[in-house]
Amino acid sequence: MASSKNGDDYEISGINVTPLVDIMLVLLIIFLVTATYIVKEAIKIDLPRAAAAGGPTPRTLTLAIAKDGQVFVDGAASSDAAIVRKVGEERARNHDLQAVIAADRDARHGAVVHVLDLLRGEGVTKFAIEVQKDEGQARAP
């Protein structure tokens, strides 16, 4: 049997967490440094608020209308011809295409109607208008 002559047998009753903390701090630093490269540029749109806004809808084609009337399709600035081309491509893949329109609160009504007209002209009959839920207003009975 193996035994110690000096009688310095001892039981390990604690775990040194210093190496674990060091590894976690290194991982945190790596995450913070790389997170700045992962962030994508966002289109600044101030969505209107509605008390009865629904939950998230399945997004197949997203159109955003900025305050100045510029239209973005899936995050890329687009002209009318590009919108028609993109909708045509998506309709070829999915005949039951749904479009989600996010228009800035200060966007002109005519710009929104124009985009809706382009969508209907290409055969898109299902679309949704994206709004943010207004937590401050109570629902009317």
Image (cartoon, rainbow, N blue to C red):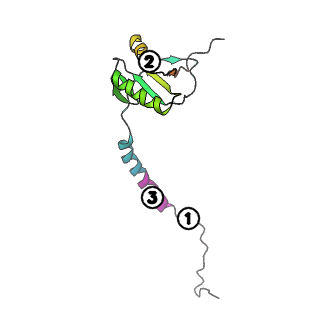
Give the distance between the C-alpha atoms of the residues marked 2 and 1, in whole angstroms: 69 Å
Mark 3, mark 1: which one is toward the viewer? 3
Q: Position of residue 40 (x, y in %)?
A: 37, 37
Residue that mark 2 sits on: 121
Q: Is residue 140 magenta?
A: no
> Left or right: where does residue 64 sit relative to residue 55?
left
- C-alpha distance separating marks 3 and 1: 15 Å
Q: Residue at x 35, y 21 (%)?
A: 80
Q: Secondary structure at mark 3?
A: helix
Residue located at (53% from left, 19% from top)? 134
Rendered-image quadrant of the C terminus: top right
Q: Nearer the viewer, residue 85 or 56?
A: 85
**Residue 36 higher or lower than 134, as above or below:** below
* Amino acid tagged 2: Gly
| Above or below: residue 41 compared with residue 15 | above
- Looking at the picture, which amino acid does disc 1 mark? Ile
User: Left or right: where does residue 69 sit relative to residue 13?
Assistant: left
Q: Which residue is mark 3?
A: 23
Query: Measured from the top left, where is residue 132 in percent x and y?
Result: 51, 22
Quadrant where the N terminus sits is bottom right
Residue drawn at x 39%, y 51% is: 30
Look at label 3 and name its amino acid: Ile
Magenta stretch? 7-27
